[in-house]
Structures are given as C-alpha cells and as structure tokens.
Image (tube, rainbow, N blue to C red):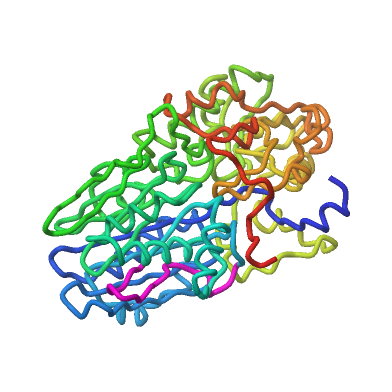
Amino acid sequence: MNTKEMEKNPMPFDGLHEECGVFGMYDFDGGDVASTIYYGLFALQHRGQESCGIAVSDTSGPKGRVQSYKDMGLVNEVFTPEILGKLNGDIGVGHVRYSTAGASTRENAQPLVLNYVKGTLALAHNGNLINANELRHDLEYTGAIFQTTIDTEVIAYHIARERLNSKTAEEAVRRAVAKLKGAFSLVVASPRKLIGARDPFGFKPLCIGKRDNAYILTSETCALETIGAEFIRDVRPGEVVTISPEGGIQSDMSLALAPEKEARCIFEYIYFARPDSHIDGVSVYGSRIKAGRFLAMDSPVDADLVVGVPESGNAAALGYSLQSGIPYGTAFVKNSYVGRTFIKPKQSSRESSVRVKLNVLKEAVAGKRIIMIDDSIVRGTTSDRIVKMLRDAGATEVHVRISSPPFLWPCYFGTDIPEREQLIAYNRTIDEIREIIGADSLGYLDVERLEELSEGLSICKGCFNGIYPLEPPKEDIRGSYEK
C-alpha cells in the first residue's frame, strides 16, 4: 500500500471492528439493575469502545418514566458511582458501540429511549440493516423526524408504529423485525417486559442468563460469568423471546429459517468474541485453537518459535504450536490502556501508533525464526509494521500465518470490512501480499476449514467468496445518512 493510499485511510490499527454489544436485565424481585448492567457492559467492552449507555425503568412505577445516561467513551470513563446511583429501576438495557453505520457522535449512542402513545421503549441493537434507507424514507414521508443517523432509530420507530395495532409489545417487536433485512440482535425494555430478537440468519449472537430471580439477555456468555449469572440458552436465529414475571421466558419462532439457511458471522469465532465466550454452543477459544491447528496442517514451515499478535492471535498461535510441536512463546507486550483519549499519531510522526499499542520482547525473538499468527489482514497497513518490528528485534525469519481466509469482499452486516479497492488481498496474489508486508512466507486459513471452526453450524462467508446469505445492497449504504 503506497503512502497516498495510507494518508487517505489513516487507520492506525488495521484491525476489524464489530458494531456493538448489548445487555438487558429484568429483576423480578424489584432490585435495581443499573450497576449489574454496568459490569455486564464492562465485560462486553471489546465489542465497542466508542460510546456506551444504560436506560432503566421501574416496572412498579409510572409507565412513561425511563432514566438513561449515555456518552462517548469507555464504560468506566462514562459511568461514575454518582451517575449509576441515580439510575433506579428493575428493568433496563445497556449498550457499547463501535460505529459501522452512522457517525461517531453522542446522539448516536445507545440505548435509544422512545416515548410514545403506549408508554416507553428502551432499545439496544447490534448489527447492520441493509434496508434501513427504505424503511427510513417510508417513515419520513409520513412525518417522522429523526434525531440520529443510526438504523436503530428506524427499528424503534417501526416497533412504536406496530405497537398501535398490536395487542402486546412482543407482537409489535415481531411485526417490526419482520420488515428488517440484515443483521440484528435486539434487546428491548418495554414498561413490563424484556424482549430479545435475533435476525433469522443469526449473524450476531444473543443469549439468555439468570441470576437469582433476575433474567438477562446479552451478546456473549462472558458477560453472564462476569456478573455471576448462569447461562440458560442462546436465543435462536429468528427467535423473539419475551421475559416477564407472568410468563417466564416465552418464545416466538415464526420468523425462523431452516438451519442450513442460517448465516452466523464467522468472525465472532475468529476475532470479535472474547475467548471465554460460547456462541451457539461452540467455544470461541476452541475455534481459535482449531484455526491454529489447521494452519499448521495446511501451511507448515520450519521455525523456532510460534507467537500470536494479541489478543485474538494468541489462541490460534497456541493451536499452531500444539499441532506442529514448535514452541509457543510471547513476542509482544500490549498496552491495553489506549482509550478514547488516545491521540492518533500523524503518518509522518516518529511515534508509530503500532508501537504505542504493541512492543516486541527482543529477548524472545532475537536470532530466531518466528511464525507470527494474526487473525486477519485488512488493508495491510499494520502487518508490515509488525513484521518490521520483529526483524528490528533480531528475528532471522518471519513467517506470517493468518487464522482467516483473505478478505476479497466488503461486509454489509455489521463488520467494518471496507470496499474491495481498499483490501490488500483484492487483485493481488498471496506472494504479492507477502512481499508488501515483508514476510518470508505467508499462509491463510483455507475457506473450506471455516465450517469446522463453527462445528458445522451454518455461517456467512460473504467477505471471503462474495456469496452473501441475502442480496447485498447495490451500493455501499454504510453511513449514508450523513451524505
């Protein structure tokens, strides 16, 4: 990638980002849920570091009263004990965000709180809709006024509209989500119910947990473990679940597809989810160990040490080591405290943004042939710097192995894989990519191996082969409300 291209796309860390994490809770005993939602969001911080928010209400109080707070920044930056102390209620939803569609502004932070004729809704959403523009236009032509540029507000409006003609809040949610195309995991707090919905393809994860007499809906099982809750089950693709003291957990599967048509995002297993999570019954850590084992089987090379690029490369590196018998070691020290106040160095400055985030342990790599495992190469702007750092630290050879196939197509379902022209693998051979990043050899995970990572569950491979589970938009609609 040349300097001009890098200046146009000054991405300091050439990694992928996921859109969001959601967490909803309803305590049937009437206890306050805000502080538990805070800890749940803390466990989901890896899913989004741009903004966060919590909205709560009291099911025994007036129907229209929702207290909420949201702002830009990390969970522990935004919420103080004083702020949490003012959020009183036994039902609520929380959200952490990274934007793939809609600008990074405070207005676009979630949850969204909607006051309307039938009461209130607080809504948090993870995913990306491909028909959000059409749905938005329909609403605008009937007088709707939008406060944000995110597709979550479109969902909220449609739920509110359907509620006028529905007997229950969950029926309104089901009727609204039936209009949505794309990826969504939703958590909705109505005045007396906690409702979760997962798109029919199951792109994004959602699960149910329980602690004492309180129920939880959240993106990942690691959040349940953080708050000492037990995992009950995953919300199934196409399912709408309703949780209330009267009905317990009620399920509506009317939007579900046949299992073979489902299309989970494989990147939950490769990169996005925390390694201690299980998604649809499959261990994320186990998937990453497997990916490393497959790389060792399919792209073997002689070397002295296998290392992972933190964090998601570490388990795959261990898998490569276990399969190949080559020792596993630590080559990188990561600074985990790069929060929202991190000023990104200019391209021309001496402070490399990669070095700010990663340092090499010279003693570990000097004089050695290194196999470096990473989860992906997007634009290639970081991989070449990391390879150079290893060489500068004295590595005699650097062999790069990637625990995903090459990216050849953009993603429209909530992962910020860019347009094809910006992808290093587009129109280049593996050897050309190897030369650009400065490695002695380069190997990617075989596309055929992906189903083995998800233990046979149906997955989306659109970013690798251009075959999407549903017709993609004719143009890139991501962030189009600002245009």
How far from the left and from the top, in percent, is residue 176? 38, 56
Q: Is residue 42 visible?
A: yes
Q: Is residue 408 magenta?
A: no
How far from the left and from the top, in percent, is residue 105? 58, 72
Q: Is residue 360 visible?
A: no
Query: Where 204 sits versus 125, above or below?
Result: above
Q: Is residue 116 magenta?
A: yes
Q: Residue at x 57, y 60 (%)?
A: 99
Q: Residue at x 27, y 79 (%)?
A: 64
Q: Residue 444 or 451: which is nearer the viewer?
A: 451
Q: Residue furthest front?
A: 142
Q: Residue at x 56, y 26 (%)?
A: 320
Q: Quadrant of residue 445?
A: top right
How far from the left and from the top, in percent, is residue 418? 69, 48
Magenta segment, which residues? 104-122
Q: Residue at x 13, y 54 (%)?
A: 247
Question: Would residue 424 be found to the left or right of residue 221 on screen?
Answer: right
Query: Where 71 sits versus 303, above or below?
Result: below
How many discs mark residues in the rendered view? Answer: 0
Q: Residue 80 or 34: which is nearer the viewer?
A: 34
How far from the left and from the top, in percent, is residue 306? 61, 30
Query: Where 384 sits versus 49, above or below?
Result: above
Query: Where 382 sits versus 266, above or below?
Result: below
Q: Quadrant of the C terminus?
A: bottom right
Q: Residue 16 or 365: which is nearer the viewer?
A: 16
Q: Quadrant of residue 292?
A: top right
Q: Quadrant of the N terminus?
A: top right
